[in-house]
Image: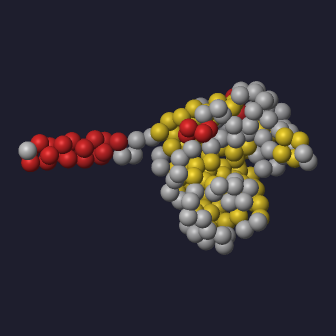
Amino acid sequence: MNKILIGLVGLYLTLQSCSAGKMDTKEYLIPEGHNYSKQWLRDVRFSSKTIEFDFKPDSTWLYEDYDFSFGNKIYGITGINPRKYSCRLTWRSVNNQLFIGFLVHADDLTRSEVICKKPIDGSWYHCTIKDTGNFFKVYFDDYYIGIQKKERRWLVYRALPYFGTERNGIVIKAPHEIKVKINDNS
């Protein structure tokens, strides 16, 4: 009996080690006229305060610019209310070029910034976002941004892809189907 129990524990540990570091690849489809994918609810996961992910933009990410500065959300971490507490990697399309940035809501402040311009050439890009308590830290390729904050949350979850924003009472939604492919390495 003990040999069977030891064998089962060994098998369990072996299977766990095989799955460690396995990427969780998802493709989120944001339908035309919507802000988020239909699978958003089943994919919400509570998370640690650090997420690592890769994403692969494609031509569906290009659209006529609607002149909203925060951009569309690729992935990130958030509290219950993303407009009060969140840190997300963003993108926007200007003249058929892709700009990557970040958006942070914390301490009743909003900060948004473009990090760089990237081609849509089939490449995967890597990002790490950390909530260290006093800082949100964003690592993207060779870029690092630290945003100091006072507010802390004990409960965070993954903020999934989102297109658009609300500006002056007008809600901007996806002009066509948008595919967001994410490898979650967390």
Q: Which quadrant of the view contains residue 173?
A: top right
Q: Residue at x 51, y 43 (%)?
A: 184
Is residue 163 shown above or below 83? above
Q: Residue at x 30, y 45 (%)?
A: 16
**Residue 185 or residue 145, whichever sits in front:** 185
Residue 101 to residue 41: above or below? below
Q: How is the image coloured?
A: secondary structure
Q: Residue furthest front?
A: 1
What x and y, as percent, mark residue 135?
Answer: 62, 68
Which quarter shows the N terminus?
Answer: top left
Depth check, front residue: 54 or 115 = 54
Indicate the position of residue 93 as horizontal and vertical percent values. 77, 38
- The residue under the point 80% across, 44% down is 165
Residue 138 found in image quarter: bottom right
Q: Residue at x 82, y 49 (%)?
A: 69
Q: How many marks?
A: 0
Q: Is residue 11 shown left or right of residue 20?
A: left
Q: Position of residue 126 (x, y in %)?
A: 55, 46
- In this image, 136 relative to 106: left or right? left
Q: Is residue 124 visible?
A: no
* Residue 30 image offset from top left, x and y in percent: 69, 32
Asked whether residue 18 is in view, the answer is yes
18 versus 149 height, above or below:
above
Image quarter of residue 147:
bottom right
Residue lying farthest to the right in this orientation: 168
- Compared to residue 99, the image places residue 82 above or below, namely below
Which is nearer the eye, 5 or 101? 5
